[in-house]
């Protein structure tokens, strides 16, 4: 029995397991632990592909397992978080008890993206639209920003029903938008070929150090904006 070929799929299932645990913490509105387990699940999601390449394991099973695991960790969980944010929001639009269910539009957008990603041959070396793990981290950070960033008046708007619904709609859009986003994979170990990635990682560290939880959504926003600038001005030095 070749144990190595099962290691990538086992790591993928750990991603799913973390997503299930995160769901429990979200239901208890323990968003810090939910954020931790989503982050851990995304960590496993990154390394299942690494070990699949290392052990030269390929197959349709791994591809399907990966998407199904991501559907929970990076699809259902962020939609569930938005549901609770809308439940606890200021009701400028309506006190209708069904409004919070619109938070699951994020889950629908994530599902569509994951399904399309599996059949889109253009996304082998980069992404088109925001990857679901990045979107999930953005959403999971919002309740923590609200909790720990009281000194930042700008973040008070995150308790607004209008703002949360706009974030929900934009999330579903950016997940499936025809916007090329650079990948963080380093294939050539030269400074010239990785300036964009190194610059982004440096900026990310600075944002997280100075803004902590509030730095997470800022990192995701910076990722999208740098990708757009890269598409326009070729910041990575490659010919477009």
Image (spheres, rainbow, N blue to C red):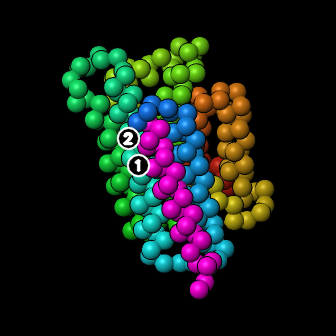
Secondary structure, mark 2, is helix
- Asked if the stretch drawn in magenta spans residue 24, the answer is yes
With respect to residue 199, does 5 lie above or below?
below
Residue in the picture at 44% in, 23% down: 158
The quadrant holding residue 92 is top left
Could you tell me how many numbered marks the image carries?
A: 2
Q: Which residues are magenta?
A: 1-26
Q: Where, quadrant-wise, is the N terminus in this rendering? A: bottom right
**Camera-side residue: 103 or 182?**
103
Q: Which residue is mark 1?
A: 75
**Camera-side residue: 174 or 28?**
28
With respect to residue 21, does 85 lie above or below?
above
Residue 64 position, x and y percent, is 42, 68
Locate residue 7 relative to residue 105 in the image: left or right.
Answer: right
Locate residue 28 relative to residue 10 in the image: left or right.
Answer: left
Q: Where, quadrant-wise, is the C terminus in this rendering? A: bottom right
Residue 54 position, x and y percent, is 66, 74
**Camera-side residue: 5 or 186?**
5
Residue in the picture at 71% in, 31% down: 209
Residue in the picture at 35% in, 17% down: 90
The crowd level at tag 1 (other Cα within 10 Å; few <14, some 14-19, many 20+) is many
The quadrant holding residue 49 is bottom right
Identify the residue at the far right of this view: 190
Residue 184 position, x and y percent, is 63, 55
Q: Which residue is mark 2?
A: 79
The answer to whether residue 97 shows anywhere in this view is yes
């Amino acid at each position: 029995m070749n144990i190595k070929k099962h290691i990538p799929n086992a790591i993928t299932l750990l991603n799913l397991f973390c997503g299930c645990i995160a769901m429990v913490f979200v239901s208890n509105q323990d968003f810090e632990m939910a954020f931790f387990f989503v982050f851990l699940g995304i960590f496993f999601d990154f390394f299942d592909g690494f070990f699949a390449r290392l052990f030269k394991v390929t197959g349709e099973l791994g591809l399907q397992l990966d998407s199904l695991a991501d559907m929970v960790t990076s699809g259902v969980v962020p939609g569930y978080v938005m549901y609770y944010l809308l439940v606890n929001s200021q009701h400028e639009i309506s006190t209708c008890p069904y409004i919070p269910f619109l938070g699951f539009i994020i889950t629908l957008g994530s599902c569509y993206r994951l399904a399309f990603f599996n059949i889109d041959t253009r996304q082998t070396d980069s992404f088109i639209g925001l990857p679901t793990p990045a979107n999930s981290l953005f959403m999971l950070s919002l309740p923590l920003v609200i909790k720990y960033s009281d000194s930042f008046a700008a973040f008070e708007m995150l308790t607004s029903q209008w703002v949360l619904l706009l974030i929900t709609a934009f999330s579903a859009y950016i997940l499936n938008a025809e916007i090329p986003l650079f990948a963080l994979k380093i294939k050539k170990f030269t400074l010239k070929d990785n300036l964009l990635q190194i610059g982004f990682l440096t900026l990310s560290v600075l944002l997280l150090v100075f803004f902590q939880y509030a730095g997470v959504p800022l990192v995701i926003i910076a990722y999208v904006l740098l990708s757009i600038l890269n598409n326009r001005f070729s910041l990575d030095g490659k010919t477009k």
